[in-house]
Amino acid sequence: MTAFLYTVIMLITFYMGGVYRNTPLMVLSFAEAAFFVLMLITALAAVSGTEQHFKKDMSYAYKGSKFTVPAIVINRRHFPINKAVVAYRYFYINKKENKAKKAVLSVEQRSEKTVDLSAVGNYCGILKVNIFRNRAGDFFNIFRLWRKADESADILIMPSEKPLKIQKSSNIYFNDISDKTHGSAGDSREIDQIRPYLIGDNFKNIHWNISARTDELYYKEFKDTGRETIRLFIDIREIDKTDLDKTDAFYELCSAVILGLLENMGNVEVYWQDNDSIKSFALSNKDSLQSVLTGLYYSKSGEKPYSPPIDGCFLLNCRLELYFGDRLIYKFSKENYEEEIMTGSFML
């Protein structure tokens, strides 16, 4: 609109100067035309010299919460951009799930600036944030031009921490380790191994001394010799990631079952089949829960047939059925699973 108005004024000035043979008006019209071309060239240079990308760190957010995703906008030109616009959308499966949003900012010459893109995740799983266009213009904003972009970031939407109330009878043992519990937090915790830091690990357990010496993050993994170890197999063979309601319920149940077993029974060994390989995680507390869920989010069901274990093992499948051995403990519903998690109490 600004460019249109400027063009109208320029044409009127040129017309008046020609009709009345007014030299100052003619000079002014040529100056306006030169300025017009200069601003167009400046706008083209600005939009071609503007880039944007996301930070490489993987981001997490909880379901239903509003959050921001930082994106870095870079101006490689020798002049500032007053109104740079980043157009983005966020979605799970289909880019048309949500309307496009815009973020406006100014960027100084040859510098970069961080802009926070707001989003909300209504389902557990991988929420993709995609920058698909950016706009920049000349200093006076006469021309503001769009340019296509394609920058994406994965935001892992985590379920709320609601443990399932599940307990065992006194005559049930899962292995030969005695059924002792800790008297207080931190008792009997020994370092099992020191390994490189993985995305999702709790920062509280980083080994800062080794990390400082090596300039890489290292993580302290603890073992707990006073608690039983429970096996949980997560069967993802029938997972349909296009059914957001059902996958949301499934991931919520995965979190609730793991937390419930950790709180009420002992250490948990979680495993599932990812394509044709078996993934496994050993948990003694909830610090590694994000790593487990991250692995589940990115896993794909393999084509190779397999038989989940039965004896002495919990099993949770995509039909929202929780088994212990070959006995069905409970079948949760997609509509009321949250209430069933909060109010249900299950005894083996």
Image: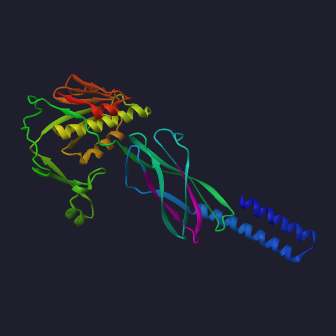
In which quadrant will I find the C terminus? top left
What residue is rendered at 36% in x and 40% in y? 297
Is 108 or 183 nearer to us in this picture? Answer: 183
First to last magenta residue range = 67-88
In the figure, residue 31 lies in which quadrant? bottom right
Q: Viewed as shown, does residue 189 lie left or right of 207?
A: left
Pinpoint residue 303: horizontal percent, then vertical percent.
35, 29
Q: Viewed as shown, does residue 274 lie left or right of 33?
A: left
Q: Residue furthest right?
A: 20
In the figure, residue 239 lies in which quadrant? top left
Pinpoint residue 167: horizontal percent, then vertical percent.
17, 32
In the figure, residue 27 lies in which quadrant? bottom right
Q: Viewed as shown, does residue 264 lie left or right of 67?
A: left
Pinpoint residue 214: horizontal percent, then vertical percent.
24, 64
Res 302 seen here: no
Q: Viewed as shown, does residue 38 lie left or right of 240?
A: right
Q: Magenta stretch containing residue 219, yes or no?
A: no
